[in-house]
Amino acid sequence: MKLKQTIIKKSIIFAAITLSCTFAFAQEKETPKEGWRKSGNIIFLFNQSAFSDWVTGGENTIAGNLGVNYDFNYLKGDITWDNKILASYGMTKSKNSEFEKKTDDRFEFNSLIGKKAKGYWHYSIFLNFKTQFTKGYVYGKDLNEKEIRTEYTNFMSPANLTFGPGMQWKKSDDLKFNLAPLTSKVIFVDKDFTLPNDAYFGVEEGKSTKYELGFYASGYAKLGLMENVTMENILNLYSNYLEDPQNVDVDYTMNLVMKINSYLSANLTFQTIYDDNAFEGFQVREVFGVGVNFGF
């Protein structure tokens, strides 16, 4: 237990330092104009490996990943409304596997309404929704060593809806954080998947929802590291007052885009999640490749 808490604290500190450094070196932005500000990009990454009589071994694979990152923000007087959609989906096919497997599957929507209080501070109400698009499986082998899979997740199972009032500090669209001490969180699952002893994302067997009340903190910082290189940092922290408040959920994402030309870029996405309702340890996702970018 002490080791787990130490790891959690170090991860929170690491993510917080990363965001703090980004805040410190972020460039000044011009005062935004009133009305809607919309920006986003679509990226497609493709990877392929092929071997023929390769004596050191190798596995033929084909993989593709499609991602969308879209912001649509509104400003009118002392009212701001910030929205962000993050969606990605990826598949890989290996010659030595009977099944096509997901490499990525994510849908997330963030929305925050703020009313200016003083300086860079705003009274705020936020909403965050997360789920995945398609079924997810746990893979294994049967008694004959044949690969098998068992359905474990699906669209809206699990899904997380988090919302609550708070205070937002916002210097620009690229530099902001929000604190919400009275945050509600609802976990949705397909009750047919629930397992004994709260094993299915914290939801009790036979039930399809779980309610939590806790403290939520989020931070966002984006900056240009050098010409044609940008880094986006997103950090979310959550503590459930009603159950094990010392086990802080951590979700940190770093998106690094190295632009080659108007349509090509090298992209690195790193994400780490700690949520003891989902997995006893850290989940890590890393995607790197050269892809085709379309800005809109």
Image (cartoon, rainbow, N blue to C red):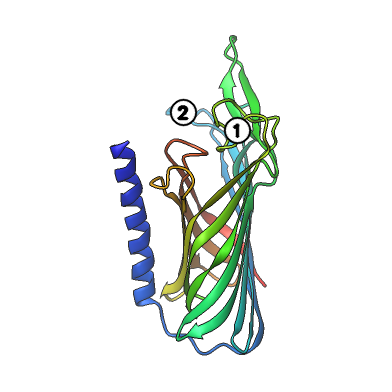
**In which image quadrant can residue 296 be found?**
bottom right
Residue 248 position, x and y percent, is 42, 49
State which quarter of the image contains the N terminus.
Answer: top left
Q: Is residue 219 above or below residue 203?
A: below
Q: Given the current orientation, which residue lies at the most extreme front position? A: 242
What amino acid is found at the position of numbered circle 1 in the picture? Glu
Residue 57: numbered disc: 2
Q: Is residue 4 above or below residue 290?
A: above
Of the numbered discs 1 and 2, the one sitting upstream in the chain is 2
Q: Residue at image x 46%, y 50%?
A: 241
Q: Is residue 180 above or below residue 73?
A: above
Q: Is residue 23 above or below residue 211?
A: below
Residue 70 position, x and y percent, is 63, 67
* Residue at mark 1 to residue at mark 2: CA–CA distance: 46 Å
* 85 or 50, nearer to the observer: 85
Q: Residue at image x 70%, y 36%?
A: 190
Task: State left or right for residue 154 relative to residue 57.
Answer: right
User: Tag 2's secondary structure?
Assistant: loop
How many residues crowd mark 2 within 10 Å: few (<14), some (14–19), many (20+)? few
Circle 1 is placed at which residue position?
204
**In which image quadrant can residue 43 be found?**
bottom right
Marks 1 & 2, CB-CB < 8 Å contact: no
Task: Note whether residue 95 is visible.
Answer: no
Q: Residue at image x 55%, y 48%?
A: 212
